[in-house]
Structures are given as structure tokens and as C-alpha cells.
Amino acid sequence: MDEMEEELKCPVCGSFFREPIILPCSHNICLACARNILVQTPDAESPQSSRASGSGVSDYDYLDLDKMSLYSEADSGYGSYGGFVSAPTTPCQKSPNGVRVFPPTVPPPPQAQHHLLPHTGVLPPVPRNSCLTCPQCHRSLTLDDRGLRGFPKNRVLEGVVDRYQQSKAAALKCQLCEKSPREATVMCEQCDVFYCDPCRLRCHPPRGPLAKHRLVPPAQGRISRRTSPRKISTCTEHELENLSMYCVQCKTPVCYQCLEDGKHSTHEVKALGAMWKLHKGQLSQALNVLSDRATEAKEFLVQLRNMVQHIQENGVEFEACLVAQCDALIEALNRRKAQLLSRVTKEHEHKLSVVRDQISHCTVKLRQTTGLMEYCLEVIKENDPSGFLQISDALIRRVHMTENQWGKGSLTPRMSSDFDLTLDSGPLLQTIHQLDFVQMKVPAAPILQLEECCTQTNSATLSWKQPPLSTIAVDGYILELDDGNGGQFREVYVGTEMICTVDGLHFNSTYKSRVKAFNSSGVGQYSKTLVMQTSEIAWFTFDPASAHPDIILSNDNLTVTCNSYDDRVVMGNTGFSRGVHYWEMTIDRYDNHPDPAFGIARADVMKDVMLGKDDKAWAMYVDNNRSWFMHNNSHTNRTDGGISKGATVGVLLDFSRGILLFLINDEQQGPVAFNTLEGMYYPAISLNRNVQVTLHSGLPIPDFYTPGESEAAGSVC
């Protein structure tokens, strides 16, 4: 009930409706508020100003009103309907309930400033040529001579407001207290007024004419008021007439006088009670639909609130995962840092070791060289020629040898003081800058679109879509079907399309299908399994793509002949591997006793010889007197009875028993021709130019044959 309160408040005053009237735009407004927002039009002689808004405008006129409205954000809100000229620009105001209201730019006459004339209890007369603008839709309407009385009163809304206020009132209040109404103690049934004790003593003394009035407790008075009969609505055109009929064209209740001499005399009318029940039923149906939408909206709000909670939980979890991943990267970087520092330390120690070794070696060698030099200088100081010459050669050789040793790069550092290691951090920095979120989740299960999935003969078309609101990237889809007999699923399609047609299925078989999506992170879940049934009856035609070039096809590939005197083979465009199938061929032309052959064949059968000459065909060839069964050039089971023009040759293939038999003119020709048949076979015939036949496929099984019966087979080939 609290949610309904806004529907019960006036858009002008923001309070509960008091004496609401219905505007032609179907909005409601308090009668007193309507008078307060009236504006008097200056163009009193306009021919359009005589159009009344309360009685002369019906629902089907609203489109014209919309087109003529000149309301904008800059003007006063009053349009040019009925010859009215826009008032000067006036800023809009807002009523207590938030609806914009455009007050009149000129002060209303003194009598319009009061809701009621003193001591009368009725509205004062409305000035002529007044204009009223709906505060909700801003449609501008010009009043006629009846003024506000031209608008019907909304007694239903008034009753709803009354019941709502009574249900909301915790305690009934006195209706005569001027300030801070006190709690009512009694209710006068005749006056229909609630009184507190002081107001009852002052305004309703228990003497004189009022002594006969019945005073009841407030609660009982509330019940009696609620159950009191509501005033009967009267016609706005004829105030003394009650509304008794309903004008279908104007969509408004009318009285009998309106039908006799009013503008509704030529309109279609119906009984008020019947239309009341009809509209109540329509409103109830509309409310049922709206109730369903409201229920869906409530469920949707619950879903959204759950999503808020899930988003918060997932956000916290995702942040924790992100921090953990970044911490792991930092830890790995620290470990690599320690490894690189260890390498620098080793390089540092190696350089120091080499330089120190060279220093030690050079120091020893320098000491030896210095000693040799000092010794040689002392030898040179000797004055004994013979003694000097005895050792001079040896000393000269040692000096040269020592000098040569210093000249072999011994005075070049063995190690550079610079570190040749350079840290290549560019790729890592680039990787860090490129660090971003990537798809790490597998796709959700696709949704099969059942309205677009179908089967036709022995093919199936499947369509699917991604779940709504799914943002996970999909690289492709995998469609799987079983074998039509409850076997294992197998892949029949892998790709990016979301619709696929699978051909070459078994007839009269039940297939299960499912689809799943995949991306770089893996393969998602399967969709729900869809069960499909292929056609029970096999419809097919001759296949021009696989026919011998000499074959001539016509009649939508149902009629076939040949332009060669040699036998040529043509097959059907559908293969069989399961079920029971029967088809017939009518002999349209038969000349010079040829031998056409009828039967089945593998896809790679020879096309330039009679059907049955190789091991890829099982056939019956027939002339005008006899027939034979033939497979792999072996002739068996000669049977009397041939064909002529107009004859019919039937072929029955039963995979439940693996047999093939033939009929001529609805009679079985010979025994069962072949048995133990397994695999994929195509209908086939061979003929020459002397024969023309027409195919009839998808025929019911002959009455004499019951699938599964035990019959003796003929020659097995």
C-alpha cells in the first residue's frame, strides 16, 4: 500500500487528491488545484477557443493535441491549442511530489484565490476563455462555458484515497479541530463527521434538531462510512442525468439524453454494466501480465544483489591473486638478482686473483733482474782482463736472455680492470610494461538455440550462442554427435561458426548432439544435450553429380534415360545404412527388349557397365519375359515375368535383417535376392537409350512384408 501512495497524490499540491477531476489526457488533478492554475486567454474571439476540453475532446484527439503543443523548456508551458497565445516566459516550479508546475503569469481574480465562496460551499464561476495545462504532460486545453464542470469527477480515485487514508490512520482525528486535530471520540452518522469531545460540545450539542442524530464510536463510524453507498456519477453534459451507457467511439460513459440529442447520438454505444465487466476483465488480464513482469523484476533485483555480493567477493579474491602473482614475480626477480650478484662477485674475485698472481710473478722476476744488473756492474768494475773474459760471454747471454723475457708481453696486464658484464634488462622492462590481464578462463557452456535447430530428411541443423553477459574470449566450437543408436559421441565440426548442418545421417534414427567452446586456456563445459529425430521415410532423387555423362536427367532429377546404347549407371543422392526403405520406378518407355537393372550399389561402383557386373553392386536385371539377380557378374535365380511400358519395379532394402528383395507390379519377383548386407548403399539403376524410368521414393512398406519376419534367402553373393 505504501508504494501506491504516489498514485494518490495531486501533482500540484502534493497532497492526497480532494475531489479529483479527470483531464482528457487521463491525468487527474484536484478540483481546487485545477482552478488555481487556470490562465485566462486574451484571444476571446478565436474560433477555436470554443472547443471544450472536458466534453469535446476524446482519446483519439490526443495525437492532434500533441502535434499542436508548443511546450518547451523556454516557454511558459502553455501551448497554442484552441487559439491561445503563449504567455510570457515564466520559470517553472515543482510541486511537493516533484512534478513541474507552471503558475499563471497574471494574478488570478480575487474569487479564484479561495477554494470556496463564503457560506456557499461551491466553486465560484470560472472566467470565460480560460486555459488549463496538465501539470504532468503539459497539454494545454481551453475550457468551454461549463468551465471545470466539463471535466468528469474521478469518484473511483476519490474512494481509493478515502480507503487508503482510513487504512493508514492509526487513530481517527477530529475533522473540526483547526490546529493539531485531536483524536476523535464519536462520529455522527447523519452529519458524517468525526468529533472530539470539545468540538462535539461546541458544534454538535445534544439538543434541538441535532438531538435526533445518532453518535457512534469512531471505529464503527469508519466501517459505516466505508460501507456507505457511493454517490452515483452524473453526466457532465446533463448534470441531472445518470450515466447509463458507454460510447465505444469516444470511450466515455454517457447518459440517455446524450444519445437522443447530444453528439453521441450516431455513435456505437453499449450497456454500462457490460462494458464495466469487460474492462474489468481486460484490466485484470493486463494486471496479470504486469504482475508477471513485476515478479520477474523482483527476481532480477535479487539476481543483481547477488551479483553485487559475488562481484565484491570475486574482486577481493582477484586482488589477492594479483598481489600474489606480483609478489611471486618480485621474489623471482630477487632470486635472479642474487644469482647475478654472485656472478659479479666471482668475476671480481677472478680479476683480483689474476692481477695478484701477475704482481707476484713480476715482483720475483724484477728482483732477479735487479740482482743480475747489480752483479754485472760489479763485474765490470774488475781490472783483471783474463778473469773478466772468462765469465763475460756467459753474463752477456744471461743479460740478453733476461731482456728477451721482459719483452714477451710480460709487462702487459693479463686482466682488464673493467667489468665486461652488461645486464640486459631491456626485455624484462618491456615485459613488465606489457604485463596485463590475459584470458585465463575456459569458455562457459554454449546455449543451444532450440528454435533454430531442426532436422530435414537425413540432415540436422544445429545453432548455438554464448551465454548472455559472458565476456570470456572464444576461439572456436566443437560439435559432437553420437552414432544415432546410443553410441559414443564423435566430433563432426570444429570451427568458429555458431551454426552447422550435418548431412548423411541415418534415416529413422535418434541422434544426441552437444557443443562446447574452447580458447587458449582450454576447453569449456558441454552444452545441454539435444535429442533429434531424423525422417522415418527416405525421400531422394537421382544424383546428376555421380551419374555417367551419358545419363540424361529431367523432371527435377526424378526421370532418367540415356543417350547411349550401352548400359550406364546412375545412383540416388542419398545413402542408406539403417532402417527399412522401399522405392519404386515406373517404366515410361521400353523399346527393343533392353535389360535395365535395378538395385543398390556402393559409392565407387563402375558407371559404364550393367549394374551388378562388379562386386560393388547388387541388382536385378529384367527383360520383357524374365529376370535374374546379379552381383559380381554372377547370375542367379532366373524368374519368369518381365516388364513393359507402364510397369512398376519396386526395391525393398531391410537393414534390420540385411536383405534385399524386388517387386514387379506389386508382386514379389523371386525369393529374397541378397542377404547379409551391411554398410552404406545407394539406390542405383543401369539403362540405355531404349528405356526411360521415373523414380518414386519415400513409399510405405508393402502390406505383405513385415520387417523382422524370417524368410528363406535366395542365392547369397
Image (cartoon, rainbow, N blue to C red):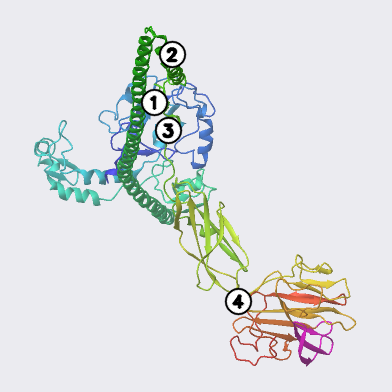
Residue under circle 3? Answer: 428
Query: In this view of the protein, which residue sits in the foreground, 252 or 370?
Result: 370
Q: Which residues are magenta?
A: 619-646
**SS at circle 3:** helix
Residue under circle 2? Answer: 389
Residue under circle 4? Answer: 578
Amino acid type of the residue that numbered disc 3 sits on in the rendered structure? Leu
**SS at circle 2:** helix
Q: Are marks 1 and 3 in contact (CB under 8 Å)?
A: no
Amino acid type of the residue that numbered disc 4 sits on in the rendered structure? Arg
Q: CA distance from mark 2 to mark 4?
A: 124 Å
Say above or below: 103 vs 185. above
Q: Nearer the viewer, mark 4 or mark 3?
A: 3
Question: Closer to the N terminus: mark 1 or mark 3?
Answer: 1
Q: Is residue 622 magenta?
A: yes
Q: Quarter-wise, where is residue 392 in the image?
A: top left
Query: In this view of the protein, which residue sits in the foreground, 76 or 661?
Result: 661
Question: Closer to the N terminus: mark 2 or mark 3?
Answer: 2
